[in-house]
Amino acid sequence: QVQLVESGGGWVQAGGSLRLSCEASGYTLSSARMGWFRQAPGKEREAVAGIYSRFGRTYYADSVKGRFTISQDNAKNTVFLQMDSLKPEDAAMYYCAAGSSSFSRWDVQSIYNYWGQGTQVTVSS
C-alpha cells in the first residue's frame, strides 16, 4: 500500500520560512516524478513545484520561482519543499504527489497516481 505523508506545515509570518517533507512508503521515489501542489480555500488546486530526480530536473510555478526549492533524498524516500520569503498568498493546504508517467507536463495533476493528505501552511501579514 502506497502512502505519502506530508509534514512541516504550520504558521509563519510573512517573510518567514517553512520546510515541508513528504515521506513515501510502499513506493520508491528514486525513479518517480514528484510534485507539490497547493489549494487555498475557494480556489482550485495548483501546481507549485515538481522534481524528476531520475533526469535531474526540477520545475516551479512562476509564483514561487526564486523562493521555493524542491529536493529529494532517495535514501530517506522523502521529498522536501523549502519555502522562503513566504507571502500571505502562499497560505494553503499543501499536497505532495507521486507518479511514474514520463509525460512532459509536470503540472498536470492527472499524471500523478498517489497523493498525500496534505499539510496546512498559514502565512500572516
Image (cartoon, helix red, strand yellow):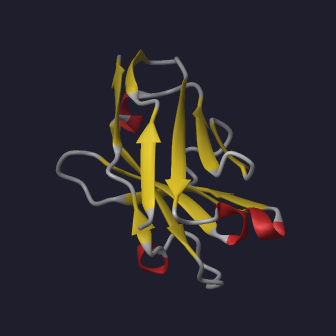
Image x and y of residue 43, in percent: 24, 54
Residue 63 in view? no
User: On the rendered structure, is 40 left or right of 111?
Assistant: left
Q: Residue at x 53, y 47 (%)?
A: 23
Image x and y of residue 73, in percent: 72, 47
Looking at the image, the residue that sits furthest to the left is 42
Seen in the picture, residue 101 relative to 95 is either above or below; the reply is: below
Q: Residue at x 56, y 44 (%)?
A: 64
Residue 10 in view? yes
Image x and y of residue 83, in percent: 57, 33
User: On the rendered structure, is 70 left or right of 25?
Assistant: right
Seen in the picture, residue 111 relative to 39 is either above or below; the reply is: below
When asked about the image quadrant of residue 123, the answer is top left
Quadrant placement of the C terminus: top left
Seen in the picture, residue 54 relative to 41 is either above or below; the reply is: below
User: On the rendered structure, is 89 left or right of 41?
Assistant: right
Total count of labels: 0
Q: Between residue 93 and residue 29, name the one nearer to us.
A: 29
Seen in the picture, residue 107 relative to 77 is either above or below; the reply is: below
Image x and y of residue 98, in percent: 52, 66
Q: Residue at x 59, y 78 (%)?
A: 100
Q: Residue at x 17, y 51 (%)?
A: 42
Looking at the image, the residue that sits furthest to the right is 56
Quadrant placement of the N terminus: bottom left
